């Protein structure tokens, strides 16, 4: 019984983890919260639907299409909304305002396209669940968990062990220094946005499969924000841990006290976390830059 | 700095000119050969799919009449006002419609929150507001008398909730219910109490009542609590997307019992579900299997690429009732209001509409209980909604 | 005329809320995504006190503001010592929590169906007078010692700390001041629309207000006022665009942020001195323009 809740929590947490990572990636490099991320997920989900799933393509092509279009959208968003702010070396708050507006813009386009209709992904699996002992596991949850884990491990590997990853970390540490070391900062930032966009596309499709398609699908991004605060802003591993923890916590709260007051308790836990361990679980040290 | 100021001055000038133009354009009197009606709907925002559906239905009705030459030689123009699902926007939209555009009548949203906010304001004017909110508080004041301009054009939540409970108990013999509802959705909340009251009045039990909020998408843990209680049926009034998730997740967890849903489980729910919709019972304004309605569904899909829902037909009926009123009493809004209040036996797609002057809800309008066989809707039982 | 009054009243109520954000974002560089929740606290508390307990409107407003400030203090406590981003994300979580409470406490708040039957006490005159008084107060604050400390903190928190400014204390004071103003706008809102429901006060609303402050020029109170009028008037003017309305709006804001990052006015303020200078510039500009033509 309680094992079942644990599994449900883990499934929820893995969705949050994917959201929180894509969001944290941009934060890590540019030190700002990309509020357009929710709308990017929505767009990714709809691109996957219209370009692929609606044509009867399978799950893998749909995921690829969503990731590619998410990456393109991420790049476009960077060029349209953030490049000039970067050039001007403005304070992070401009990124924030720009990202929220970009989100509104993207959501506006989605609403225009989908209008009054409802959409849902076709079923990618024959039967929807399997059983291990008395525990029921939904196939889409399991797939989501595995694919999220693969994507996140891959990302961690790239960041930790490749040249591009080193460059990314160096840009994240200090843009000017990185530039002096001969790193093409703009290229790295664009790459970050593309990877973040691809992750948005991936999580968008997952959300779409699990939760149906609608223009405000991306509002789930709020959970990603909260997860990254618990995990420690800007830390990728922290975001993942925070997300899984949030998913588990919510599921247990819902089981114990119902869904109604769950956000209140989540918020209180977040406050306590900030009082006791203000840098988050991962304890990454993001200093305010002047 | 100086450049900045110039820039700002230019922007200010542009905005000022634009606003003057907008006001001038807005206050243009309707041409003599034209009657204007307004449609206040959520065109953007979270409930945009509902608002657009009502709007499209009403527009189809008006377009059909205009194609035949209009009413008494006048064409009808319909103006849509977007509320963005925001109360403040809705008040401005409403005020613009009645004071600046001087509409003869208004078509309102199926969303109670917007209609609740507009009800007290509508008292200040004399323009009838034909809406689809099912919460009785929208049409009836705290003292029990109706708002003079507010008219609900489908059976109220009290009627719909009790019909669903009656059907489940009398025709299906269910005795133990579990309820899962969206507590941040006014529509779902308004359908909760009537159902529970009817169940209790019949000596049956509601074993578990559990609720979720707008951002919840994973209902497995909540459903688990219901399934543990071993219920005959799960009642869930909610919007289409939520009902799809609840069905998928409840079935995946091995629940074989009945699911009782409100209006939003009507088609295209069956096509979106992606699996068999057996053992689902839902209430609907229309008999979806009627050939005439099927023909409209097909033609709208072909011409406008819209998968119509019951909201479309409700909008279509309101459009046509207004057309009939305009034909009978002309474009005077007070006369239209009186006409709608005394409407008797109007044969619409959603049934025979007779307005109850005491409650401002239709009297005895039929609701149809449906189920699905696989994904094909099947009509079970007609209920006359008596107040 | 009714339309104009209606638009102006709602714009001025928004203006007061935006001024609240200006105190926080414009003066200290912090931003809150749960600011609308303080509006909710103001609206619901004052509404409940008047409708259920029959308190007079002004007293109800005072109690509502006091309660909001108290809650704001609790929210601010763990965050003012942290990096600026935290306050925005924590207030976001706070907003979710407030919405949940309002939805849950049905007997008191009416739940999702909303709180009906608030008397329409908010008149255009009241809103106008309130707005003028609040703007004057904030303008005075801006040039006070406190205001100067705020802008030192906005420019460089580390440096501000180094010269002995009590940074957490300044942040908290500014935050609570902004909460009080926003809560008051909530009182006005409730007694204007006569109806409130929990969905009105989401984080999108707070974000809209921050956008207005930036649009006008993050350092300029005059800019905030101007931007509120432009941006809340704009959607109303753009009604004819129907579906394209929010797209057009977003595109315009993006253009301004990208091509004129200091906003419409930068940190320019409408003072008698600046006004005279502006008049001189304009006349110069006209003369030059005349020559060129």
Image (spheres, helix red, strand yellow):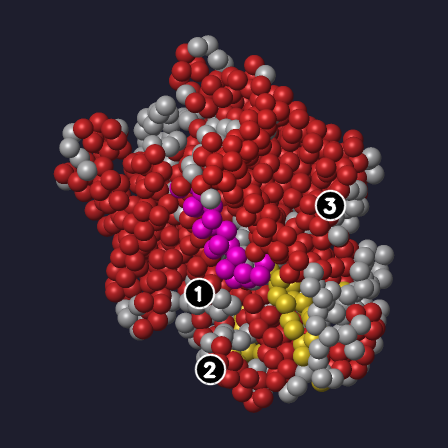
Q: Could you tell me how many numbered marks the image carries?
A: 3
Report how far apart the C-alphas of labels 2 and 1 lie in the structure.
17 Å
Q: Do labels 2 and 1 share a chain?
A: no
State the residue position of label 3: C192
Q: Residues within 10 Å of mark 2 (few under 14, many from 20)?
A: few
Q: In this view, does A252 lie to the left or right of C235?
A: left
| Callout 3 secondary element | helix
Segment tinted magenta in the rendering: C239-258
Q: Is residue C253 left or right of residue A57?
A: right
Could you tell me which residue is drawn at 40 percent across and 41 percent down? C259
Could you tell me which residue is drawn at 78 percent across and 31 percent down? C59
Tag 3 and tag 1, C-beta contact below 8 Å: no
Q: Which mark is residue A101?
A: none
Q: Residue A113 carries which label?
A: 1
Q: Is residue B167 left or right of residue A185?
A: right
Could you tell me which residue is drawn at 80 percent across and 46 percent down? C119
Q: Quadrant of residue B182?
A: bottom right
Report how far apart the C-alphas of labels 3 and 2 lie in the structure.
45 Å
| Callout 2 secondary element | helix
Q: Quadrant of residue A207?
A: bottom left
Residue at mark 3: chain: C
* Residue B204 can be seen, yes or no: no
Please say if B306 is above or below A21. below
In the rendered image, residue A112 lying in the magenta stretch gets the answer no
| Callout 1 secondary element | helix
Could you tell me which residue is drawn at 61 percent across and 51 percent down? B19
Please say if A152 is above or below B151. above
In the rendered image, residue C256 lying in the magenta stretch gets the answer yes
x and y percent of residue B70 in the render?
68, 83
State the residue position of label 2: B302
């Amino acid at each position: 019984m309680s094992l079942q809740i644990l599994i449900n929590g883990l499934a929820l947490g893995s969705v949050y983890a994917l959201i929180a990572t894509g969001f944290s990636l941009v934060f890590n490099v540019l030190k700002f919260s990309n509020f357009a991320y929710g709308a990017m997920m929505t767009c990714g989900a709809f691109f996957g639907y219209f370009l692929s799933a609606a044509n009867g393509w399978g799950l893998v092509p749909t995921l690829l299409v969503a990731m590619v279009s998410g990456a393109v959208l991420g790049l476009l968003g960077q060029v349209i909304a953030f490049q000039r702010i970067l050039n001007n070396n403005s304070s992070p708050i401009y990124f924030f305002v720009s990202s929220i507006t970009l989100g509104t813009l993207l959501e506006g386009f989605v609403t225009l396209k989908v209008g009054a209709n409802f959409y849902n992904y076709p079923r990618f699996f024959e039967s929807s669940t399997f059983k291990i002992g008395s525990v029921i596991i939904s196939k889409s949850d399991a797939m989501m968990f595995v694919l999220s884990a693969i994507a996140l491990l891959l990302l961690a590997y790239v960041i930790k062990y490749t040249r591009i990853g080193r460059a990314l970390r160096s840009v994240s540490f200090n843009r000017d220094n990185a530039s002096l070391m001969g790193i093409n900062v703009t290229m790295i930032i664009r790459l970050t946005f593309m990877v973040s966009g691809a992750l948005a596309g991936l999580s968008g499709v997952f959300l779409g499969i699990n939760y149906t398609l609608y223009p405000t699908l991306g509002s789930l991004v709020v959970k990603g924000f909260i997860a990254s605060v618990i995990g420690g802003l800007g830390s990728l591993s922290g975001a993942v841990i925070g997300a899984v923890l949030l998913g588990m916590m919510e599921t247990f709260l819902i089981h114990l006290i119902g869904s109604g007051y769950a956000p209140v308790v989540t918020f209180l836990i977040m406050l306590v976390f900030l009082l006791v361990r203000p840098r988050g679980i991962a304890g990454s040290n993001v200093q305010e830059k002047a | 700095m100086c450049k900045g100021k110039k820039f700002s001055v230019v922007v200010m000038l542009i905005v000022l000119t634009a606003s003057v133009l907008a006001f001038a354009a807005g206050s243009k009197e309707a041409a003599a050969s034209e009657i204007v009606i307004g449609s206040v709907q959520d065109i953007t925002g979270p409930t945009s799919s509902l608002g657009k559906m009502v709007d499209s239905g009403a527009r189809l009705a008006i377009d059909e009449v205009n194609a035949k030459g209009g009413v008494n030689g006048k064409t009808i123009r319909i103006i849509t006002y977007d509320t963005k699902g925001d109360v403040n926007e809705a008040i401005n939209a409403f005020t613009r419609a009645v004071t600046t555009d001087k509409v003869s009548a208004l078509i309102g949203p199926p969303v109670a929150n917007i209609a609740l906010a507009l009800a007290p304001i509508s008292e200040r004017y004399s323009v009838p507001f034909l809406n689809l909110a099912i919460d009785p508080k929208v049409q009836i004041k705290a003292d029990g008398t109706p708002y003079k301009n507010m008219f609900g054009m489908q059976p109220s939540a009290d009627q719909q909730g009790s019909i669903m409970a009656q059907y489940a108990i009398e025709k299906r013999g269910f005795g133990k219910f579990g309820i899962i509802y969206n507590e941040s959705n006014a529509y779902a909340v308004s359908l909760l109490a009537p159902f529970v009251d009817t169940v209790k009045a019949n000596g049956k039990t509601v074993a578990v009542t559990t609720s979720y909020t707008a951002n919840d998408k994973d209902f497995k843990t909540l459903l688990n609590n219901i399934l543990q209680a071993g219920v005959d049926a799960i009642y869930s009034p909610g919007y289409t997307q939520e009902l799809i998730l609840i069905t998928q997740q409840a079935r995946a967890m091995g629940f074989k019992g009945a699911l009782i849903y409100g209006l939003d489980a009507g088609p295209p729910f069956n096509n979106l579900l992606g699996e068999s919709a057996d053992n689902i019972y839902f209430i609907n304004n229309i008999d979806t299997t009627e050939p005439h309605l099927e023909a409209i569904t097909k033609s709208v899909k072909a011409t406008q690429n819209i998968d119509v829902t019951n909201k479309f037909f409700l909008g279509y009926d309101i459009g046509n009732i207004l057309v009939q009123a305009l034909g009978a009493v002309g474009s005077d809004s007070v006369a239209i209001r009186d006409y709608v209040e005394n409407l008797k036996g109007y044969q619409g797609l959603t049934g025979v509409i007779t307005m109850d002057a005491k409650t401002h809800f239709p009297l005895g309008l039929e609701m149809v209980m449906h189920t699905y066989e696989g994904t094909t809707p099947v009509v079970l039982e007609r209920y006359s909604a008596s107040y | 005329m009714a339309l104009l009054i209606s638009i102006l009243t709602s714009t001025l109520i928004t203006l007061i809320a935006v001024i609240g954000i200006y105190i926080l974002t414009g003066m200290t560089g912090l931003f809150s995504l749960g600011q609308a929740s303080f509006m909710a606290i103001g609206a619901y508390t004052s509404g409940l006190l008047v409708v259920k307990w029959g308190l007079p409107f002004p007293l109800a407003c005072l109690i509502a503001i006091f309660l909001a400030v108290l809650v704001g203090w609790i929210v601010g406590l763990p965050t003012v010592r942290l990096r600026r981003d935290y306050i925005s994300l924590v207030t976001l979580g706070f907003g979710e929590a407030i919405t949940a409470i309002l939805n849950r406490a049905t007997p008191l708040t009416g739940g999702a169906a909303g709180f009906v039957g608030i008397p329409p006490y908010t008149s255009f005159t009241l809103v106008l007078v309130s707005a003028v008084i609040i703007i004057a107060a904030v303008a005075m604050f801006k040039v006070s010692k406190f205001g100067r400390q705020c802008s030192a903190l906005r420019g460089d928190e580390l440096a501000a700390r180094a010269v002995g400014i009590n940074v957490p204390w300044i942040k908290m004071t500014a935050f609570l001041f902004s909460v009080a103003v926003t809560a008051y706008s909530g009182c006005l809102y409730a007694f204007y629309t006569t109806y409130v429901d929990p969905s009105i006060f989401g984080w999108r609303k707070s974000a809209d207000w921050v956008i207005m402050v930036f649009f006008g020029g993050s350092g300029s109170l005059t800019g905030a006022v101007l931007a509120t009028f432009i941006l809340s008037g704009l959607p109303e003017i753009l009604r004819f665009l129907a579906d394209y309305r929010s797209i057009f709006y977003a595109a315009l804001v993006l253009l301004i942020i990208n091509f004129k990052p200091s906003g419409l006015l930068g940190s320019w303020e409408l003072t008698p001195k600046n006004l005279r200078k502006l008049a001189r510039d304009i006349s110069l500009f006209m003369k030059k323009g005349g020559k060129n033509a």
